[in-house]
Amino acid sequence: MTDQPADAPANACVFCAIVAGRASAHVVDEDADTLAFLDIAPFTPGHTLVIPKRHTDDFWSVDAGTAAAVMRTAHRVADRMRVALEPDGLNLLQATRQVAFQTVFHLHVHVIPRWAGDTMSMPDWPKPAATSDELAAMARRLGA
């Protein structure tokens, strides 16, 4: 899939083209609000993308109802994967904005079945322990 700027019109969006039937995809689930289809460059066999049918740039742009619909579909797809593929685990991945590695600027959630020894690796981010005071301050900032 090609990179697309966040301000691109929906008619230039490859995912919108899939929803509209102007581009092909291997669909695994569909309802009134969402579409799930196989990723064309899968991390593992069965790697699926779940999108809202209505164009929404990213997670910060989506309304709560649409976000819930996307997660319900991701849950259905994950359950089907568990039965059909018998993976050892599962990753859900969502990237918002380019700095977070978003490359297609239409909200999507990756549902990725995982097996012991597969070739997918997650970023190794630093894991310094936060102090209790730091955690308390952040909780206050976030509204707790």
Image (cartoon, rainbow, N blue to C red):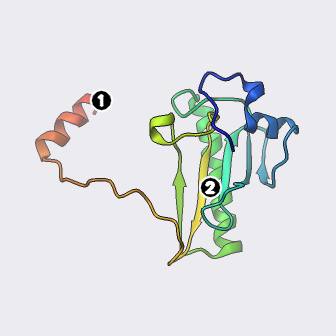
For label 2, the crowd category at 10 Å Cα-Cα, with few meaning under 14, some 14 to 19 and many 20 or more, is some
According to the picture, the residue beneath numbered tag 2 turns out to be: 75
In the rendered image, the quadrant that contains the N terminus is top right
Residue shown at 58% from the left, 28% from the top: 63
Say which quarter of the image contains residue 99. top left
Q: Secondary structure at mark 1?
A: loop
* x and y, in percent, of residue 87 in the image: 59, 74
Work out whether mark 2 precedes mark 1 in sequence or the reverse, and give the earlier one: 2
In the rendered image, the quadrant that contains the C terminus is top left
Q: Amino acid at mark 2?
A: His
Q: Secondary structure at mark 2?
A: helix
- Nearest the viewer among 79 and 109 is 109
Q: Amino acid at mark 1?
A: Gly
Residue shown at 60% from the left, 62% from the top: 43
> Are the two marked residues, 2 and 1, in contact with CB atoms closer than 8 angstroms?
no
Please state if 6 lies on the left or on the right of 1 as rendered: left
C-alpha distance separating marks 2 and 1: 28 Å
- From this view, report whether residue 76 is shown above or below residue 135: below
Residue shown at 61% from the left, 29% from the top: 57
Say which quarter of the image contains residue 23. top right
Q: In the displayed orientation, state which residue is furthest to the right.
A: 21
Please state if 108 lies on the left or on the right of 100 as rendered: right
* x and y, in percent, of residue 137 in the image: 17, 34
Residue shown at 85% from the left, 35% from the top: 20
Total marks placed = 2
- From this view, report whether residue 84 is shown above or below residue 103: below
According to the picture, the residue beneath numbered tag 1 turns out to be: 143
For label 1, the crowd category at 10 Å Cα-Cα, with few meaning under 14, some 14 to 19 and many 20 or more, is few
* x and y, in percent, of residue 77 in the image: 68, 58
Mark seen at residue 55: none
